[in-house]
Every structure is written in structure tokens, then in C-alpha cells.
Image (tube, helix red, strand yellow):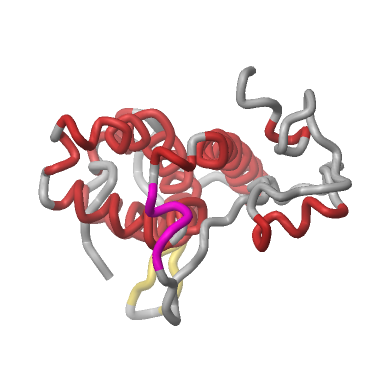
Amino acid sequence: MKNVLLISEEVLKTYTAINENVQSDELRFCILQAQNIFIQESLGTNLFNHMLDIVGNGTIYNPSNTVYKDLLDTYIQPALISYSYYLGLDNFAMKWMSVGLVQNRSEQGSPGDFKMFQYMKNNAKNQAEFNDNLLRRHLIFRSGWYPEYNNGNLNDGQLPPEVNQPFKSSITLPSGAWGNFRASRYNVVNSPLCCGSSFPTWYGHSNN
């Protein structure tokens, strides 16, 4: 596992409700977990590893990597911030101690009940999936900008990019031949399309 972070702990604090007094090492696991699971799923292992490489060695700031820098700033980081916050809610609600799982408490406040926790989890999940959808939509329309998105051999333990919508709630989405998108990429027939494009109505049109 590469320990390159695509956002910093301070960025996570700045753009979420996480208090400044939370130690950075408490957040590092949340970020790594979120990017290795959710961001890798959307980018696919090849593009994900490429992003880790150019961020880790600093070449993402080279003019030749402008599109990757824009991808990171505009799409990856908002999704990663949301997913890190989503996972962090679990990590901070309970802690492993020598006596077992312990609910966090403080002298300055009382812990929220399960109903409030569930509301915050659902809200964080909705925001994360919305940002993830923007990321996937961009990658589908602009896949030619990122050769690693479609190319490269996948070995055991590596993932192809996930192109289906990230929302897990029971909402109505295009089905039928669109389910074959992963195998045929853009050669889709007999599925609901938008404005005569090769993309399903869920993603709109590349000229929108």
C-alpha cells in the first residue's frame, strides 16, 4: 500500500466539521482508507496508482500534467474529503481500548445518540456519492485525457474503473444494455440515451 495522501489532514479539517484539535494521525487512516477503497474504485487501479506516483514525486505540478492536476483539484479531492469524513464518523464514534470498544465522551459535551449518528452518516454518504458522481461523469466524458483510465494490464488485486453511478439508494436508473457498458465501453445500444449521445441519460450529454 502506498502511503501517499491525495489530501492533507489540514485540508480535511478545513472543509469538514472536524475540529482543529483533532490530531492529524487520527485522520490519516480515514484518508488512506477512503482513497484506497472509493477513489481507486472510481479511477481504476492504473489511473489511481498513476495519481499516487505523480503526487508522491511532485511531478503533478509539471505543465505536462496539467489535466491530472485539474482532475485532482476539481474532482478527486472533493470526493475524497467527503468519503474521509464519512468513514471518520465511525472511527471517532467508538475507540478500541484494552477493555474493548469504548464510546467517546468529553467533559465539554455529551456524545450524540444513535439517531443523530445515523443522520450524520447518511448526510455524509449523500455528499460523498454526489461528488463521486461528478468524478465518474468527468472521467467517462474525458477519458481520452487520461490514458491510464482505459489502458494497461490489470493483475490480480487490481480494479478496472467503476463506471456505474455511485448512489446506492433505491432510485430509478437506466438499465438494460447499459449494464454491458463495462465490457463494451461506449458501444452501447438499446439503452436510454441523452440527445443522441453514446452516454445514458444518467450522465447527460458531454456538451451540457
- Depth check: give the residue in front, 97 or 110: 97
- Residue 153 seen from this side: yes
- Residue 139 part of the magenta-drawn span: no
Residue at position x 29%, y 50% in the image? 51
On the picture, is 134 further left or further right than 26? right
- Give the x, y percent position of residue 93: 47, 55
Above or below for 97 versus 55: below
Q: Main secondary structure of the magenta part?
A: helix
Residue 157 location, quadrant: bottom left
Q: Which span of residues is magenta-colored?
A: 147-152
- Give the x, y percent position of residue 178: 78, 51
Above or below for 66 versus 158: above
Residue at position x 41%, y 48% in the image? 84
- Give the x, y percent position of residue 169: 76, 47
On the picture, is 161 further left or further right than 172? left
- Give the x, y percent position of residue 13: 31, 35
On the picture, is 137 further left or further right than 115? left
- Depth check: give the residue in front, 179 or 145: 145
Residue 70 location, quadrant: top left
Total labels: the figure holds 0
Q: Residue furthest top?
A: 208
Rendered-image quadrant of the N terminus: bottom left
Rendered-image quadrant of the C terminus: top right
- Residue 104 seen from this side: no
Residue at position x 47%, y 46% in the image? 83
On the picture, is 3 further left or further right than 132? left
- Depth check: give the residue in front, 141 or 108: 141
Residue at position x 23%, y 42% in the image? 8
